[in-house]
Amino acid sequence: MENIKAQKLLNKIQRDLMRNGIIINTIVEDLKELRKLVVEENIPLLAKVTRLAHEHISENQDFLIAIPDDIPVELDENGDPIEVETEEEETEVENSEEITGQESLEYMLSLMAEHSNKLNEEELREYVKALKADAGEDY
């Protein structure tokens, strides 16, 4: 994000979350405002993840999306991430340690701060998939 106002708002959201936890009205309004700023900056991925996050929080009165599982990745010759095939099937969420709520939201916000990093971008896309699945939207 280049917009100083957007950076400051993201920092404020992160500070408020760490200090006070998820205060529904405050975080929803701050995410709506942040979305406006990233739309102005033309960052579609951040616009989508902020919209889905504030809608999810409004509907559920909490952030119920787990931190995405680590997916083994390697970088191709252009520095873009590529998934590595593994012998193991993806573990079901029930079989893995779930971290949800405040920790997951804090992690998602930290990814947004460095959204141009290819690996962070991939993880933000995983959040979008999970938020859409939770909302019943097709990805």
Image (cartoon, rainbow, N blue to C red):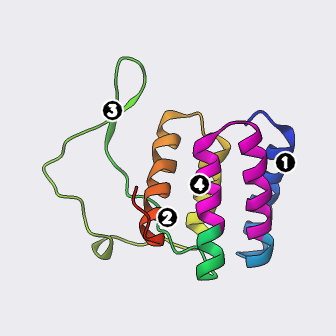
Q: State the image coordinates of residue 1 (x, y, percent, origin top left).
A: 72, 37
Query: Nearer the observer, disc 2 or disc 1?
Result: 2
Q: Main secondary structure of the magenta part?
A: helix
Which residue is depicted at the point 66% across and 67% down? Answer: 54
- Tell me if label 3 and label 1 are in contact, CB under 8 Å: no
Q: State the image coordinates of residue 111 (x, y, percent, origin top left).
A: 59, 48
Looking at marks 3 and 1 on the same chain, the residue that comes earlier in the sequence is marked by: 1
Q: State the image coordinates of residue 104 (x, y, percent, origin top left).
A: 55, 65
Disc 4 and disc 1: Cα gap in Å? 18 Å
From the image, tell me which residue sits under label 1. Answer: 8
Question: For the residue carrying disc 1, how many other residues have a C-alpha within 10 Å: few (<14), some (14-19), or many (20+)?
Answer: few
From the image, tell me which residue sits under label 3. Answer: 74
Q: Is residue 23 above or below residue 79?
A: below
Give the extent of the magenta segment.
27-54
Specify the label residue 119 is tagged with: none
Looking at marks 4 and 3 on the same chain, the residue that comes earlier in the sequence is marked by: 4
The kind of residue on which mark 4 rests is Val
The kind of residue on which mark 2 rests is Leu
Between 107 and 25, the residue placed more toward the observer is: 25
Circle 3 SS class? strand
Disc 2 and disc 4: Cα gap in Å? 8 Å
From the image, tell me which residue sits under label 4. Answer: 49
